Image (cartoon, grey):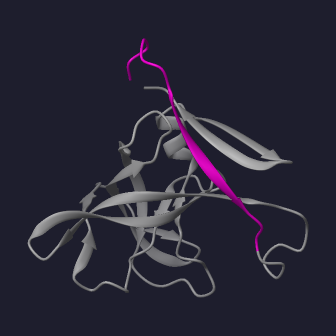
Amino acid sequence: MNPLAPPTTTLLRCRQPHVEVCPCPSRLFTVRVRLLATGGRRFTSRGFEALLSPGDPISVVFPREDEADVHIVTESVPYPSDLSWNGARARLVQIRLGLPVLERPDPRPFRLRALLLLEEVEGVSSLLRIGAEFLHAYRAEVRLSADPCEGRLIIPA
């Protein structure tokens, strides 16, 4: 991180959760991200909807079944015990993430430590969840507003 360079800002979209999920007034903040992937025999990137989820201690990535020939590039991160998320088996990985920023046309690259789920979790949306570890690791500032409903993720350069 360069202390002289200005931070970058990512706009977050505001959504209202389904009433059966949250019976009280609340909002979800999401952003469209790019993840490094392989397709065929070449590198590519795929767009994913990501949910800002500071209540998750670590980010969570769900395997995509809709494109069998495209796979998220993951790097295993050694961990001494078995891991799970909401009862589903998972393994600790590092993925490469591109966040859209206001300051430039191309996504800003990051490495994201995440739990890669090894099985499906019934009734859970398969949005990539950006957890607290990412926010802490990159010293991100989160600004959320309910009226007007908007959000900003500000990350030092």
Q: Quadrant for residue 92, please give it.
A: bottom left
The span picked out in magenta is 1-17
On screen, residue 142 versus residue 156, left or right, reads right
Q: Residue furthest left?
A: 41
Picture coordinates of residue 6 (x, y %)? 48, 20
Residue at the spot 26% in from the left edge and 59% down from the top edge: 76
Residue at the image position 37 percent from the left and 52 percent from the top: 97
Can you say which quadrant of the picture contains the C terminus?
A: top left
Residue situated furthest front in the rendering: 105
Residue 103 drawn at (x, y percent): 46, 33
- Residue 9 shown in magenta: yes
Point 86% across, 48% down: residue: 147
The image quarter in which residue 67 lies: bottom left
Report the quarter where the N terminus lies. Answer: top left
The residue lying furthest to the right in this view is 24
Q: Is residue 77 left or right of residue 157?
A: left
